[in-house]
Image (spheres, grey):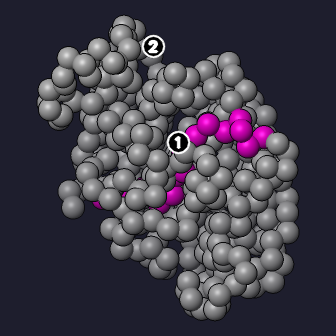
Amino acid sequence: MTQLRSQTAATHRAHLSLALLFLLPLGFIACPNSAPPETGAQKAAQPATTPTPTAALPAFDGQRAFAHVSRMVEMGPRPAGSQELARTRQYIVGELQSYRLKVTTDEFTAQTPGGNKQMVNVTAELPGQSADAIIVASHYDTKPYKEFRFVGANDAGSSTGTLLELARALSHEKPRLTYWFVFFDGEEAFCRGWDDCGKPAAPDNTYGSRRYVAHLKEQNQLQRVRAMILLDMMGYKNLQLRRDDMGTRWLEDVIWDTARDIGHGDVFVAGAEGVGGDDHEPFLKAGIEAVDIIQLNDYPYWHTAADTLDKISPRSLQVVGETLIASLPRIEQRLQK
């Protein structure tokens, strides 16, 4: 695995701005040399597109995102229902409100193998030109352990810190679609292992995301959600992101191709990442197109006491943040065709 080189946020913003001058519209994302020549009939079947100038994109600050991760790690283990998670939630809500976003919370009781737990999902809304929404999400709880102190710097500090910085960076924009920045409670299981609780009636994880989808259905709002992007475990200093094997292919294509176009093809690499039971799954089951940006199998500190702040790199957070900010306009364009 290639060691990521440390670069300043300012340098990356400069490189990003230069690279964006050459971004092509979504219809031309694929490299022309990566596929066989098209026939005349195939070319005729494609709608004509006219390249349009790319506006300057909001600047993502990896150091800011890293500072959020550091604050959460300082709070210690943050399992669902704990006082530490309540303080984390207060911090998240305070940051989102400081960006002048509309923040709502949904408190619910989850039946878990560890008893009933009070959980709270947090949503910040950035209104767009359309009421249709794109969700960008992370869970913010950590897995409960009695054997050791688990502070979850990567799982899920890195994704939560990145999502907060994305919300700040985009907060002054007027996107085509409405953005919901969603922080799920209760992603982690209460049982020590997947099979330690026998066969429960419902999964022992993804409590918050399952609740979120159910609540959307109850409110007759599910049809508003056009796509869902999940962040989870994407801050490792040796970051290599492969495509989630459950995800929606076209969403993955847009994000991975955009990463390559802006110079981050060394992080968003080829190959598949085996993922099951993450927070995007309830959305996929509900018919919503979704993708999980995660490095799971090549992260050696997953669910160990060593998942600490020294494993996280501001550079990794920067790469993911820049890539998502550049990808979202392309995703909107695809959804509005």
Q: Magenta span has 225?
A: yes
| Residue 16 location (% of width, % of height) | 34, 27
Q: Disc 1 designates what residue?
A: 64
- For label 2, the residue is 55
Badge 1: how crowded within 10 Å, few (<14), some, or many (20+)?
Answer: some
Alpha-carbon neighbours of circle 2 within 10 Å: few (<14), some, or many (≥20)?
Answer: few
- Image location (x, y in percent) of residue 180: 68, 38
Please name the amino acid that badge 2 sits on: Ala
Which residue is found at the position 56% from the left and 76% from the top?
Answer: 150
Asked whether disc 2 touches disc 1, contact meaning CB atoms under 8 Å apart, the reply is: no
In this view, the residue in front, 287 or 324, is 287
Residue 98 lies in quadrant = top right
Question: Residue 147, can we see it?
Answer: yes
Between tags 2 and 1, which lies in front?
Answer: 2
Of the residues shown, which amino acid type is indicated by label 1? Arg
Residue at position x 31%, y 47% in the image: 268
In this picture, which residue range is highlighted in magenta?
A: 221-239
